[in-house]
Structures are given as C-alpha cells and as structure tokens.
Image: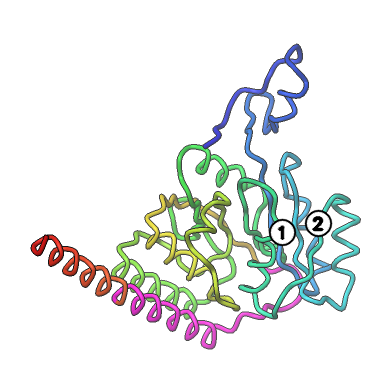
C-alpha cells in the first residue's frame, strides 16, 4: 500500500512530482482518492458539502438519483471536474454501488449530500488507510465523535443493532448505521455488495469483518441536515438492517457447515489413500 510521504522538492522530476498530492506543506500522499456523493434533489445542500472537500482529492463522483431540481448543474458549477453518473435503481445502496463502479481512485470515500458530513475529516480517514487499515469506519460514538441529528430512539436502535453485530460477527464497532466511511478500492472484490437501501452501510460493516479486513474507526461528527428532509425512516429502515444482520448470520452458519463438511471429506480421502 502507498503511504503518507514528504512532498518532493521542486528540483525533482515533474512526472514523479505529479504522483504526489499535497495535503500540507509538509505532507503528501500518493494514492488517488475518489469521493462518492449520492444525491437526489440536494441542490441547496451541495454548496455546503463541496465547500469542505479538500482540494487534493483525485475526483468527485456525484451519483444523481433522477433529481428534479438543479443538483447536477449546481455540482458542476461548484466542482467543474465532477463526474456525474446516473443512479441505477432507487435506493442508497444502488446509488453507492453505481458510484463505486465509476471510481478510478485507489481510495474511495463515501460522503452524504445533506451537509451532515464534514469533508475536512477525510484526511483522518485517508491517514488511517495509508497507515495500514483496509477500511476506515466513521463513528459518532468513538471518543472525539458526536452527532446533532439522532433522536433517543434512533440512538437506542443503533446501539442495539451494533451490539448484535459485535456479538454475532466478532466486531468491535461503536457505531453501525453511519454512512461516512472510506476504504481501499480492492476491498470491493471481497465484500460483494448486493443491497438497495440504507442498510448498505450495515452490510459493508459486516462483510469487511467476515472477509478479515483490518478496520479502524474514525471519530466523526454528524451535523444536522441543512435543507430538506431525509428519506430515512427509523422503524422501516431499522427492520431492513435487522434482516440484513440475520441473513448474513444465516449465510455464515451455512458456510461453516460447508467448510466442516469439506474437511470431513478431505479427512476421509486421506484415510483411504
């Protein structure tokens, strides 16, 4: 994996220098970073979102969910090089999968379009990845994190679902249903996303653990949505998250039984031979 390095001096080969993306006057990174932003009718919020994005990122991929406002036009005016792709399907999971497929960077960062995420935190996620993590998971409940946008009921539900995942899959998460995450592109080959809605973050969190990937939590602060209303429905989407957990648990048991059966067959063949 690439790492955080000192920027090359002005006397070095310009082609070599072009590989480095300066974060500060003393720090640079080599891997290109793609930021994926799923958006549907978020024209009013995008100025706040784009304002916090660091200028050293490689690309912004905006996944447009058939917006009826000026979402695409606003994005292009704010970030002329933005890559706009049309969402396949209707849910957040569909949008993210579409965006991931369009990314060309080695590192992918997921950012919501409602203004709740602070883009200046991206450096913390990237730092964790270039330091050895496979998946940098944002947490509102890790030391240093916080949220302005969760009711008591949602906090309770998130805690309960997080506890189930930790116990059933051997994870150590402090937050489960949060959409601000980053990972190396190669991780997509190991987690095989196949869900459509808000449960996509939970599915990712479970499958990175099942795949044995190294996870590091990043303290993150979630702010209130600036304009508009969220499509999230606590009860409906909480049930969908629980279904994903149960299905993944069932699949894990089936794989264990299959592996045990194969070991028995191999042992039998060894005794015969």
The type of colouring in the image is rainbow
User: x, y (%) of residue 33?
Assistant: 66, 45
| 126 sits to left or right of 75 | left
Identify the residue at the far top of this view: 11
Q: Residues within 10 Å of mark 2 (few under 14, many from 20)?
A: some
Give percent across and percent down for residue 190. Answer: 47, 59
In the rendered image, residue 143, in percent from the top left (x then y), is placed at 43, 52
Quick check: 26 above or below 38?
above
Nearer to us in this view, 260 or 185: 260
Q: Residues within 10 Å of mark 1 (few under 14, many from 20)?
A: some
Lateral position of residue 200 relative to residue 20, left or right: left
Residue 82 located within the stretch drawn in magenta: no
The answer to whether residue 147 is left or right of residue 50 is left
- Residue annotated with mark 2: 83
Residue 114 visible in image: no
Q: Measuring 76% from the left and 76% from the top, which residue is drawn there?
A: 228
Q: Are marks 2 and 1 in contact (CB under 8 Å)?
A: yes
Left or right? Give the position of 243 relative to 40: left
- Residue 150 % position (x, y): 54, 72
Label 1 sits on residue: 102
Mark toward the viewer: 2 or 1: 1
Quarter holding the C terminus is bottom left
Q: Write the start and end of the magenta stretch as one range.
A: 225-253
> Which residue is pictured at 76% across the width and 41% down the height?
55
Classify 108 as above or below 2: below
The reply to whether residue 173 is visible in this rendering is yes
Identity of the residue drawn at 43% across and 81% down: 242
């Amino acid at each position: 994996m690439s790492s955080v390095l000192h920027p090359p001096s002005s006397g070095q080969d310009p082609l070599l220098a072009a590989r480095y993306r300066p974060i500060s006057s003393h720090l640079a990174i080599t891997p290109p970073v793609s930021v994926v932003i799923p958006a549907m009718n978020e024209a009013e919020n995008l100025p706040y979102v784009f304002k916090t994005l660091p200028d050293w990122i490689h690309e912004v991929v905006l996944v447009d969910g058939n917006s009826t406002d000026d979402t695409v036009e606003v994005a292009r005016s704010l970030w002329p090089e933005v890559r706009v792709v049309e969402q396949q399907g209707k849910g957040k999971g569909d949008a993210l999968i579409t965006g991931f497929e369009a990314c060309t960077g080695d590192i992918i960062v997921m950012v919501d379009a409602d203004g709740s995420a602070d883009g200046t935190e991206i450096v913390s996620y990237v730092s964790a990845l270039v330091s050895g993590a496979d998946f940098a998971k944002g947490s509102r409940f890790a030391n240093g994190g916080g949220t302005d946008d969760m009711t008591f009921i949602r906090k309770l539900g998130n805690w309960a679902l997080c506890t189930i995942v930790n116990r059933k899959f051997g994870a150590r998460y402090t937050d489960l249903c949060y959409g601000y995450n980053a990972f190396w592109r190669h991780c997509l080959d190991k987690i095989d996303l196949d869900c459509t809605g808000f449960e996509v973050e939970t599915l990712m969190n479970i499958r990175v653990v099942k795949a044995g990937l190294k996870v590091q939590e990043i303290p993150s602060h979630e702010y209130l949505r600036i304009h508009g209303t969220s499509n999230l429905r606590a009860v409906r989407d909480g049930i969908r998250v629980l279904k994903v957990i149960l299905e993944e648990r069932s699949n894990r048991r089936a794989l264990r039984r299959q592996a045990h059966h194969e070991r028995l067959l191999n042992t039998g063949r060894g005794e015969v031979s």
